[in-house]
Structures are given as C-alpha cells and as structure tokens.
Image: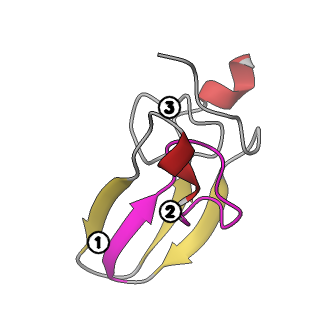
C-alpha cells in the first residue's frame, strides 16, 4: 500500500470538543486534520474516535504516527 500524503510536518494542536471525530488518514482532506471525504479515490479510510470530554490534543498531520490519531513526533524524521 502507498503511503498517505503528508498534510503538514507539524501537529494540529487544538481544543477538541467532546464527541465523535473522523481523523483524515489519507492526507487529501482540505479540512485537516479531519476527514472531508477526499479519501474516496485512495485506499485509506478515516479513523473514527470519540472523546468523552473536551481536551487539548495534538493531532497528527504527517500521517506517519504510531499512535493514531495523536502526534508522536514522527514528523521530526521526515
């Protein structure tokens, strides 16, 4: 399988509200780091995750993290 597109070489740090979220795994979304359906022409699918309460997060945008959907610093090696 091909590697996903690198959207950014830095995480998206944000206050994420409680609820269900769809993290972009393909790198093609125009709404990074979230899915906008652009994956339909790729072999990738979004990662669906839920947060029980609002929290500050660093979501991966390089698409190389080992801890999907959160940044693990993998972008530093790109």
Name the residue at the front extreme: 41
Task: Reply yes or no: does residue 32 show up in magenta.
Answer: yes
Pointer 3 residue: 65
Q: Is residue 11 left or right of residue 64?
A: right
Disc 3 packing (10 Å; few <14; some 14–19; many ≥20): some
Ranked by sequence position, the earlier of labels 1 and 3 is 1
Residue segment shown in magenta: 18-36
Please state the horizontal and vertical placement of residue 11, each as a whole percent of the image. Answer: 66, 49
Q: Is residue 48 left or right of residue 30?
A: left
Task: Reply yes or no: does residue 3 show up in magenta.
Answer: no
Please state the horizontal and vertical placement of residue 22, each as a whole percent of the image. Answer: 40, 63
How far apart are labels 1 and 3 at the CA level? 19 Å
Q: Are marks 2 and 1 in contact (CB under 8 Å)?
A: yes
Query: Is 13 drawn above or below residue 59 in the view shown?
Result: below
How far apart are labels 2 and 3 at the CA level? 14 Å
Q: 77 or 21: nearer the eye?
A: 21
Please state the horizontal and vertical placement of residue 76, each as a whole percent of the image. Answer: 72, 25
Is the C terminus in the top left, top right, bottom left or bottom right quadrant? top right
- Image mark count: 3
Ranked by sequence position, the earlier of labels 2 and 3 is 2
Query: Is 12 drawn above or below residue 17 in the view shown?
Result: above
Ranked by sequence position, the earlier of labels 2 and 1 is 1
Pointer 1 residue: 51
Q: Main secondary structure of the magenta part?
A: loop
Pointer 2 residue: 57
């Amino acid at each position: 399988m091909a590697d996903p597109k690198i959207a950014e070489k830095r995480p998206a740090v944000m206050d994420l509200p409680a609820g269900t979220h769809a993290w972009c795994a393909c790198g093609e979304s125009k709404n990074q780091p979230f899915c906008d359906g652009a994956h339909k022409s790729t072999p990738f699918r979004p990662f669906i995750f839920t947060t029980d309460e609002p929290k500050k997060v660093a979501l991966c945008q390089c698409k190389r993290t080992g801890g999907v959907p959160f940044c693990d610093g993998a972008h530093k090696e790109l």
